[in-house]
Amino acid sequence: MKRSDLPQAFQEALGTHEVLRKLGFLAKEIFVHQNPDNSVLVLLRTQGKEFIVHVGFVGMTRDEMEKEWPKAVRAFNNLEIPEQELLDMVSESKAFREKVSLIFAIQDKGIVIPNRSGS
């Protein structure tokens, strides 16, 4: 699979998910949601609070997304996408490019950025 095989919103969602993971949030705290208008959100639910990042739109039904999203996640996690494309997907994501603003916005919601890396 190539990065270009994924809808732009999936690429942005995967990049955002990875940025949140690098900040120390657990995968079980991060969700992807499709609204009725086909907008896609990454939701961070942690510490009794919720933070939402809009990542784009998809041209597919909810059923199609429920089928296709897990395939994209598997491709990302299993390195089925070339490594450089994975790195680019993360570094080109809005969450990465605007990570300082993202951190402040998360903190403004009263969410503490975890320090799970030990640094």
Image: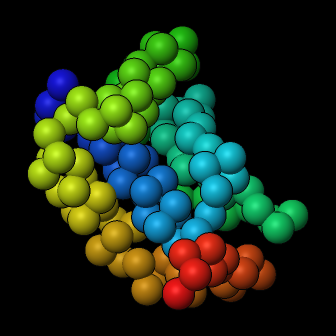
Identified at 49% across, 77% down, the residue is 102
Q: Residue furthest right?
A: 48
Identified at 18% across, 57% down, the residue is 88
Determine whether 73 is above or below 52 in the image. Answer: above
Instruction: Evaluate whether residue 109 shows in this view.
Output: no
Q: Nearer the viewer, residue 56 or 32?
A: 32
Q: Position of residue 43 (x, y in %)?
A: 63, 52
Determine whether 16 is above or below 8 in the image. Answer: below
| Left or right: where 107 falls relative to 60 | right
Numbered disc total: 0
| Residue 33 figure quarter | top right
Instruction: Evaluate whether residue 31 shows in this view.
Output: yes
Q: Position of residue 32 (x, y in %)?
A: 56, 41
Image quarter where the N terminus lies is: top left
Q: Nearer the viewer, residue 114 or 110?
A: 114
| Left or right: where 79 falls relative to 17 | left
Q: Position of residue 27 (x, y in %)?
A: 60, 49
Determine whether 113 is above or below 81 in the image. Answer: below
Q: Residue furthest front?
A: 118
Q: Nearer the viewer, residue 79 or 35?
A: 79
Q: Position of residue 45 (x, y in %)?
A: 73, 56
Instruction: Specify the color scheme.
Output: rainbow
Identified at 58% across, 81% down, the residue is 118
Q: Nearer the viewer, residue 25 or 31?
A: 25
| Residue 68 figure quarter | top left
